[in-house]
Image (spheres, helix red, strand yellow):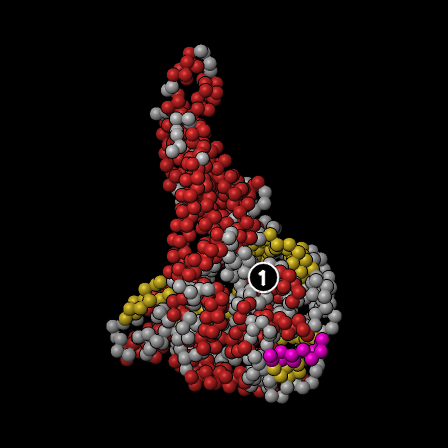
Amino acid sequence: MKKLLASTALLCALAMPGLAQDYTPDPAAKAGGSITVTYKDDVATLDPAIGYDWQNWSMIKSLFDGLMDYVPGTTTLRPGLAESYEISPDGLTYTFKLRPGVKFHNGREMTAEDVRYSLGRVTDPATQSPGAGFFGSIAGFDKAGPDGLSGVEVIDPLTVKITLSRPDATFLHVMALNFASVVPKEAVDAAAGDFGKMPVGTGAFKLQEWTLGQRLVFAKNADYWRAGVPYLDQVVFEVGQEPVVALLRLQNGEVDVPGDGIPPAKFTEVMADPAQAAQVVKGGQLHTGYITLNVGMAPFDKVEVRKAVNMAINKDRIVQIINGRAVTATQPLPPSMPGYTEGYAGYAFDVDAAKALLAEAGLADGFETDLYVMNTDPNPRIAQAIQQDLAAVGIKANIQSVASANVIEAGGAGTAPMVWSGGLGWIADFPDPSNFYGPILGCAGAAEGGWNWSKFCDEALDAKAVAADSLSDPAKSADRLALWSDIYQGIMEQAPWVPVFNEERYTLKSDRMGGADALYVDPVSIPVNYDYVFVK
Amino acid sequence: MVYVTRRLVQSALILLGVSFITFVLLFVLPADPVRQIAGRAATAATVENIRAQLGLDQPFLIQYGRYLLGLIQGDLGRSYLQKTEVAELIGSRLPATLLLMAAGIVAELILGLTMGIAAALYRGRALDQALMMTSFVTVSAPQFVVSLLLLYVFAVQLGWFPIGGYGTFAHLVLPAVTLGILGSGWYARMMRSSMIEVLRADYIRTARAKGLTRARVVLRHALPNAILPVIAMIGIDIGVFMGGIVVVESVFGWPGIGQLAWQAIQRVDIPIIMGVTLVSALAIVLGNLLADLIAPLIDPRIKLK
């Protein structure tokens, strides 16, 4: 990451094609073939402005492109539909030069006007995009409406200039989000509100067939602007398939990639069988599972109590409950995220110290509280482990095991003293430390209904976060990451969370699937990067 | 004719009641659909904007009134999360559900009638007792357990059928049998008593006295008379099945409206939940009406008033 930002420094005010490093094609890669991928949940939409689910995230990435993109299997930015870009010295103006000759699936050439339209569409409140908030730094965002954003200007058919209202060091990442995908206006209009079922993009694949609730077929886009990809002729997605069923079908040779990975109940069995274990792919994930402690509710308003809870939790045991599919966490950021503080010890498991802190807070006899948790396995089991750990220091936690929407509601309303984030936990939208702050630890997210379930709000840390994200000069990226590291350590001093673990992903692929393992656990094209995998 | 009109008016009132109760339940639900739409990073302003666009900031009666107004015009609304017309979503999945229900009815008739006839013929003997015990079990067994058992034994262990999914006749067998097992117990008991009653009738004794074989008496003389009142129950089954499909479709990955409802419930997608509930209620109401209309055709002693 540092390497990337340092290299972009050279690009300042100087248009240059390409970034520091790009993808080296796999020499073994072969074109052709069709694969079958399964998912448990139905695909709700393929509209890039709306889709925000596990199953449709990388599907949308394969149908659409944005101005920016990532090197496959990594978190390294590279240009997408933009051939090059310039950043003004004050960090407020980004001028993107578009790639000429890029065609939408309907055959029309993509232009700067499409970029303007697409950014206006995603931020228009009428679109109801769950990603609209990411574009808050573009000038005119507050007045976003059907006429588009005033900060996005078309200079000529292949040049678009975006003006920001404040420096935003994450802006290039934002331009690589699915929500920033470029869509053709005529196709959106023709779909009359159903663009999510009739998507038209510039991506490596186009939607060929969709039988609602059953299957989708993606066909190779022969005119794709990136040479050589995709390798596959076709990807068939079958939805409504339980992960256990998908696993059995994989062993039967009917499925190539079970999109939901290895079901927890089958994990030990799969890993114990050498034939199956050989098909397993493991990868990191920008994820943290945490317990929120509501600082607005007694006794969690006392920092000693919050620290005591941090010390009371046996994280190793919780990791064992999920068969070791995670590493224990000491801080909010996951280890593979830039800005992670190496060597930060956090709060070690220490029952006596926890009891001492509780006594200091005048709660030597403990207290009773509620722990909210989503009611799908393994979360209730994890909640039981937390409950036992708390009981050991005298805290009686009643488990409220409810549906995900109800956990979100209780957390957002601030009526939940403790929430275990499992199943709802934060997976980064883009690989940058700021993505773990604003909505879940900052003051903005602490408002009624926000995702900051601790209701933790420290004005000083908020100011520091703003300062960090204003350091958009790539030359200062190291300073910026240091600042973020400070912010997260500052948060841990006040202990509004118990960071418990960082999940690792374990998935499977059939023997005939080729391509680097990283493509099957892609940190950005979650869960699989369909554009670069191939059939051996 | 007057009877049919009156029943149709009653049906409409029942549907109105169902829509009202469902709407109230969804209104008081401690989960906010707008949060699901707005996403985790949304600002309070975005959330309120979406709430206003969907009319969810309005008082309950206005929200319900708007929904009814749409409903009268045949508009079930658009899914909050999929943005697609609910009517289209239900329409695309209804054929799979109807197929499964039809197959379920066939399965329960085959199982139930066979059990009932056999029990009647061997009344009071061990086979009768065993079959009636079985019918108790099938009526009480939770479908979730039955479906997993069938899946494990016949698909995973024996490999006779595919492990869930949709498309061929083989895919249909296990979910249909799961649905059918529940009803088969009722049919077995109904068929048994009906058969016993008929076998005691004078014309059966006459037929036997004529020297006809036992098989011919049972198949040609007793069965057609005994089966009619049982068949009249099929309309009522539709209601029973509507409850079962949510479970069965989810377990077998059957792409019908039960699965659609289950996924919508998890995401608080209110228009879909309302739509599926109303379609199911409509099916139940029509099924009962059909059962009542068929009854006098089968047995002229029944008069519709």
Question: To which residue does mark 1 refer?
Answer: A193
Q: Is residue B287 visible?
A: yes
Closer to the camera in the image, A22 or B246: B246
Q: Nearer the viewer, residue B213 or A188?
A: A188
Residue farthest to the front, as pictured: B2
Residue A12, position as x, y percentages in the image: 66, 85
Question: Residue farthest to the bottom?
Answer: A89
Q: Is residue A313 visible?
A: no
**What are the residue bounds of the magenta stretch?**
A150-162
Look at label 1 and name its amino acid.
Gly
Q: Residue at x 39, y 80 (%)?
A: A494
Q: As drawn, is B214 to the left or to the right of A89?
A: left
SS class of the residue under badge 1?
loop
What is the quadrant of the N terminus of chain A in the image?
bottom right
The residue at the point 65 percent across, 79 percent down is: A153
Q: In the visual, does B132 lie left or right of A223?
A: left
